[in-house]
Image: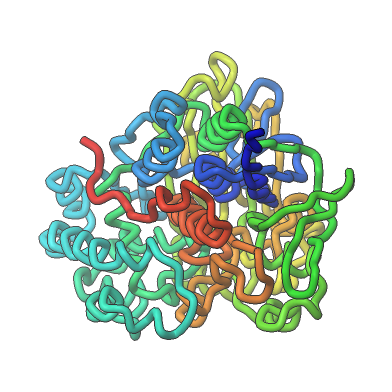
Amino acid sequence: MNVMQARPAPRRVLVIGAGPGGLATAMLLRAAGAEVTILEKEDQPGGRTGAIRRDGFTFDIGPTFFLYPEIPREIFAACGHDFDAEVELVKLDPMYRLQFDDGRMIDATADVERLTAQVAKIDARDARNVAGYLEANRAKFEAFRPILQRPFASLRDLAQPDMLKALPKFRPWSTVDGELHRWFRNPDVRVAFSFQSKYLGMSPFKCPSLFTIIAHVEYGFGVWHPKGGCNAITAAMARVARRMGVDIRLSEPVERLKLEGRRAVGAVTTRGDHDADAVVMNADFAHAMTTLVPDAARRRWSDKRIKSKSYSCSTFMLYLGIEGTLPDMQHHTIAFSGDYQRNVAEIDAGKAPVEPTIYVQNASRTDPTLAPAGHSALYVLAPVGNLTGGEDWAALAPAYREKILDRVSKLAGRDIRPLIRTELMFTPEDWRSKLAVYNGATFNLAHNLGQMLHYRPRNRFEDIDGVYLTGGGTHPGSGLPTIFESARIAAKLCGEDLGLPGAGDISTTLPMEAAE
């Protein structure tokens, strides 16, 4: 009698959080052969890249700039799906408008000749250095490409050949603003090429000079708008993940990890127990560790150490559905404070700036699906200090709302208050209480030299076996492109450790070229 050989049971992976990192990791691990369940506390996937829908208007909760679509294209392709068949992208040109307090402006474009002419309106001498600056950052990005695509587990990783080759371009003793001093004398021009450090929630006067490469990601690969908003990306990922067989459980918050010694063996939710061979954490790192894992189970990342770390800024948000259109306002506008250095210093001190810099997205001019006919969906963000600064946001918020509306009205050329048909406000306290963001720091751990590479929480979590980290709180850092890259790193480590049959097919190689 023939006896069929029993197949080994498939490996089971739990993913905590259905944000972009968790969804991408789930897709890749499922494609590699794991059984994957995602546990999400909210009633929709997406996390901070989800949607707010009110009265016929759609707003992104968090990210609105979509950069570097080549990475999600590769993730979808690795899972047998076509990203561009799932998400409709519109390339923006100009990418955004930079509005200075005195009325001058720069319409940023990837066309170097046009960009140079824009900068010349601010400073003709500095304009001559634009092309050279962009080329230098292209070379820096290429040097750091392999560093952003692999895990950092110890100091030894700093001695790898690719790291040693890239270090001269890193200039670790310098900041983003310091690096820009080498190219541009005019402070407004430096602001125009350094505000991107706010994508990381950091000041350009403190952010390491490495992050001037964000300018290349914008100018080399473009700024895109996904139809429906950036939330359409995570919606597409959830849709594809379900087709692949990933079990996405919404409205099921995790209460704690299940541990056996120093190994994670599952999670307990409000609905029951889930056993697993591995757990991927996509929740806000500091919040999740201090609430889901006992302090005694964490040696390196204890509650005390987590509390001692530096965190990014927070944001004050207004989501405004207004009657009418604003044809003179660009899709993306950054309106700088008249005293930008003071503005940044107040944020670093944990305060609400007296004269805030604001960012306004008027995406309805590009995408009419976001608002009822004849209306506009405005997303307004002001960087502010996180909750360590001690601001009383319950008392401060109403007056701060008026201050922000004054600035938006100035950009719109009219008072927008009578036009508001729906509105939602988020303060740093709301980020903490409603979206479980530690200290209300919307961009996670700060990206200073002491909190990068192997000093950042590692993608294979060093304190608990069987736990893998993805998201902005781990290596390589915040922002959608790097979060997607953290997912590829975490998925590959997890897949290899579990011996998944398709683990070798999980690529962590960043795309070389922008798509034509």
Q: Position of residue 63 (x, y in %)?
A: 53, 46
Residue 323 versus residue 274: which sits nearer the camera? 274
> Is residue 246 toward the left or the right of residue 104 in the image?
right
Question: Looking at the picture, how far across and down is residue 311, in whole percent?
Answer: 60, 71
Q: In which quarter of the image is residue 52?
A: top right
* 411 lies above or below 137: above
Q: How is the image coloured?
A: rainbow
At x 42%, y 26%, the residue is 88
Left or right, 277 with reference to 68: right
Residue lying at the far top of the rendered structure? 373
What's the residue at 73%, 64% (across, down)?
264
- Indicate the quadrant containing the C terminus: top left, top right, bottom left or bottom right: top left
Left or right, residue 143 beside residue 211: left
The x, y position of residue 162, in whole percent, is: 27, 73
- Work out whether 511 lies above or below 354: above
Residue lying at 62% horizontally and 42% vertically, measured from the top left: 5
Q: Quadrant of residue 248?
A: top right
Between residues 221 and 253, which one lies in front from this camera angle?
A: 253
Q: Is residue 398 above or below residue 295?
A: above
- Can residue 378 be seen by looking at this rendering? no
Residue 454 at what x, y percent from top left?
A: 48, 77
Please tell me which residue lies in front, 308 or 348.
308
Q: Residue at x 24, y 51 (%)?
A: 512
Specify whether residue 230 is in view. yes
Q: Which residue reaches farthest front?
A: 1
